Amino acid sequence: MPKNKKLELDYYFCSYGNKDADDFICDVLSWKDYKTFMKLYNSPDNGIDFFLPDVAFVREEGAHSGDTRNITMKRYFDRITYYESELG
């Protein structure tokens, strides 16, 4: 990716039908609240009541480039521009 292009990341997570967790995680992502996200990511509930992967997908020209970034690093977490959950 050329250095002058803004890095955009797409993040996908699963809430296993837990609507309250889904709503809260979406809020945390929209607020770009890294500290709260990391508490959820490190929670014993991660993987049981919801699943928060540690990677987001790099988007280039409207499509995924195939590259990923580790969003447990704040510099990449702050670059999440799109997120989506799977309630199922």
Image (cartoon, rainbow, N blue to C red):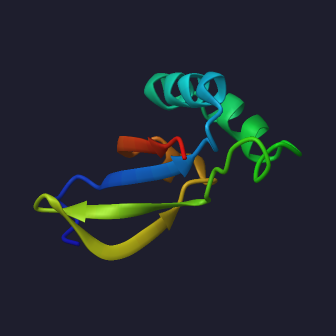
Q: Residue furthest right?
A: 44
Image: 82 above or below 65: above
> Residue at the spot x=57%, y=31% of the render?
22
Q: Is residue 38 above or below residue 70?
A: above
Quadrant of residue 53 within the rendered picture: bottom right
Res 1 → quadrant = bottom left
Depth check: 55 or 88 in front?
88
Tell me what residue is drawn at x 23 percent, y 52 percent.
Answer: 6
Residue 26, above or below 65? above
Q: Position of residue 49 (x, y in %)?
A: 76, 41
In the picture provided, is 38 more to the left or to the right than 3? right
Closer-to-camera residue (10/51)? 51
Residue 70: percent from left, percent from top: 56, 63
Looking at the image, which residue is at 36% across and 52% down? 10
- Kindly identify the residue that appears in the image at 70 percent across and 29 percent down: 36
Q: Is residue 39 left or right of residue 80?
A: right
- How many marks the image carries: the answer is 0
- Locate residue 48 relative to residue 69 in the image: left or right: right
Name the spot of residue 19 as percent of width and height, x first. Answer: 59, 26
Q: Could you tell me residue 13's position as x and y percent?
A: 54, 49
- Furthest-bottom residue in this view: 66
Q: Residue furthest left?
A: 61
